[in-house]
Image: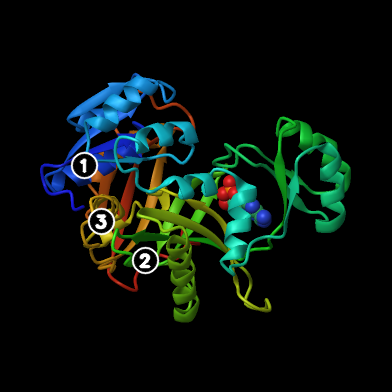
Amino acid sequence: MLIPPGGRIGILGGGQLGRMLALAAAELGLQCHIYCPDEDAPAAEVASRLTRAGYDDADALARFADSVDVVTYEFENVPAETAAILAAHAPVRPGAKALATAQDRFVEKNFIVSCGIQTAPFADVPDRAALDAALKTIGAPAILKTRRFGYDGKGQAKIADTADAATAWADIGAQPAILEGFVPFEREVSVIVARGLDGKTAAYDPVENVHTNHILDRTYAPAALDASLADEARAIAAKIVAELDYVGVMGVEMFVLPATSRGSRLVVNEIAPRVHNSGHWTTDACLVGQFEQHIRAICGWPLGSAARHSDAVMTNLIGRDVDAWAKIIAEPNAALHLYGKAEARPGRKMGHVTRLYPLGHRPSNTDR
Ligand code: AMP
């Protein structure tokens, strides 16, 4: 059951999340084998083995899974068939249920509601006619989101007025979608939660996320929530991983409604069955960060402490932001993480910086 030091972990996906997982695994004396189709894979540079093949290459997938003790992944759109091939040769953690749930927004929303947790009002929109019907019940403003393969705001169209329906339907590529009522949130928060093979969970403090152009720009740790709301956010995340019989780290994104709202102020927006960008701060501000926590969980090790020893602000270095690296390393409280990507294309995540502050002293998110 327990994969000891010296064990081998297979990681599907070769990006920065895979890279940071492989680094954390190396710290624990574990080896990583990366599987991805890409030529330049940031994760491959820090792992002991690389298989470059497609996610539909059944033979390569089987050989890869045979070469490791456990398989995990750094992106949620792992095709179900790919996961099934891998699972015939090695344990896949997190498992198929988490993937199936997180890959389809309609399934995901229904699952969250079945846990007794609040979501935005939503309706299934299999076709254009269903969009008009959904708009009648949900009303505008609303957001049309493709059921599958949406991320960083892609596959979404805002509908400010019911007259925008046709344009929105065309914008998302006329494909199965859900319509979501617009949530008048006060702030966006997330909880990074881990669940071990033994069913124990560890949730990090909720953090506040600020997006620019639909991409995460900054994470403030902790979020400015009162203690009971922070506890409720952690409990929601723990409930979700328990219901999925989940093993590994998950990011749970939530909206916080204004204090004047009736009922719970927390609305779950989406879940990511993997380590999450809004958890990058944990590497520097917690004894055991999200990457190590994920490795511990999938290897059957006990989870570590998710306690925060410092406040933190994590800033993504996107595109040319990375040119500031030399200035950043001169800052006494900054921890720089670069992903080794050669080309700083606009919108590309090149690295991140986590700035640490004594507990209770992080700058507010209005001090930009
Ligand atoms: P998503 O891809 O679902 O994470 O959505 C991307 C961003 O769009 C979120 O981080 C929010 O800022 C915004 N958003 C998504 N859904 C809603 C909603 N129902 N109400 C208000 N804003 C939303």
Q: Is residue 79 visible?
A: no
Mark 2 or mark 1: whose residue is earlier in sequence: 1
Please provide percent x and percent y for residue 82.
Answer: 43, 31
To which residue does mark 3 refer? 284
Q: CA distance from mark 2 to mark 3?
A: 16 Å
Query: Under tag 3, what secondary structure?
Result: helix
Q: Secondary structure at mark 2?
A: strand
Crowding near the residue tagged with mark 1, few <14, some 14–19, many ≥20 C-alpha atoms within 10 Å: many
Element at label 1: helix
Circle 1: residue type: Leu
Of tags 3 and 1, the one toward the viewer is 1
Give the spatial CA distance, label 3 vs label 1: 14 Å
Q: How many marks?
A: 3
Disc assigned to residue 23: 1
Q: Name the N-terminal-most of marks 2 and 3.
A: 2
2 and 1 marks in contact (CB < 8 Å):
no
* Quarter of image, res 19: top left
Distance Cα–Cα, label 2 vs label 1: 22 Å
Q: Position of residue 183 (x, y in %)?
A: 68, 60
Q: Is residue 112 above or below residue 342?
A: below
Q: Residues within 10 Å of mark 3 (few under 14, many from 20)?
A: many
Q: Is residue 70 above or below residue 292?
A: above
Q: Which mark is residue 203?
A: 2
- Left/right placement of residue 4 relative to residue 119 reads left
Depth check, front residue: 222 or 97: 97
Classed neighbour count for the residue bearing mark 2: other residues with Cα under 10 Å, few (<14), some (14–19), many (≥20): many
Residue 215 spot, x, y in % from top left? 52, 43
Residue at 87% over, 54% down: 136
**In the image, what residue type sits under mark 3?**
Asp
Q: Nearer the viewer, residue 25 or 324?
A: 25
